[in-house]
Amino acid sequence: MSLMEGMCKIFFVLVIVLPLIAKQVSATQHVVGGSQGWEESVDLNSWASAQTFKVGDQLVFKYSSGLHSVVELGSETAYKNCDLGTSLDSKNTGKDVVKLNKVGTRYFACGTLGHCDQGMKMKVTTVAGNAPSTPASDSDTSAAAFFPRYFPTFLLFSPLLILYFLL
């Protein structure tokens, strides 16, 4: 293989693969409530208003399963009145992930009786993906969190890259 062929192959990798990985890297995982998580003692709306949520980001709800749950409400009225009967979705695993897939405001509350009325609820406003962002200081940006999230992208492209370099 000539030097020119090798350089062309490296250029191919940089032009094709890196933009795909960069798109995923730009998404942020926001741990709701910061280090305390999805708990009654946290002022969830103050926490949410201090964040910038972009399309593609994820909310991670961490809490004690059985003690709390996450209910997505369908309207601001349902949110204000803690009307859990109009929920769009409900989760109760203790580590629930919600993808923010469109611009707009979404409403979340705890489904445990009385918790929403006591203030365990929040609204999240999502902006377009190219908006300026302040990464959440409590988001997990460690290598351990990065690797599992982006490993599928690597697996998808690794056979293609291996074949390309072998041919």
Image (cartoon, rainbow, N blue to C red):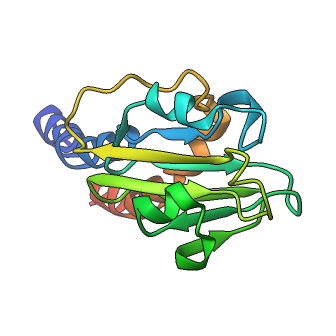
Which sits in the foreground, 66 or 163? 66
Q: Is residue 61 left or right of residue 39?
A: left
Where residue 74 sits, quadrant-wise, is bottom left
Q: Quadrant of the N terminus?
A: top left
Which residue is located at x 77 percent, y 41 percent? 40
Residue farthest to the bottom, as pictured: 85
Q: Residue at x 75, y 67 (%)?
A: 92
Question: Quarter-wise, where is residue 125 in the image?
Answer: top left
Height in image: 113 above or below 154?
below
Q: Nearer the viewer, residue 14 or 23?
A: 23
Give residue 71's quadrant in the image: bottom right
Residue under the image location 19 percent in, 37 percent down? 130
Q: Residue at 66% across / 50% down in the picture?
A: 61
Residue 91 position within the rendered picture, expressed as x and y whole percent measured from the top left = 67, 68
- Image quarter hosting the C terminus: bottom left
x and y, in percent, of residue 26 in the image: 35, 37
* Count of marks, rendered view: 0
Find residue 157 and report its horizontal and vertical position in percent. Answer: 37, 59
For the view shown, which residue lies furthest in the front direction?
Answer: 81
Q: 33 or 54: nearer the eye?
A: 33
Between residue 49 and residue 146, name the one nearer to us: 49
Question: Can residue 65 be seen at all in this image of the molecule?
Answer: yes
Can residue 165 be seen here?
no
User: Is residue 52 placed above or below 63 in the rendered structure?
Assistant: above
x and y, in percent, of residue 43 in the image: 65, 31
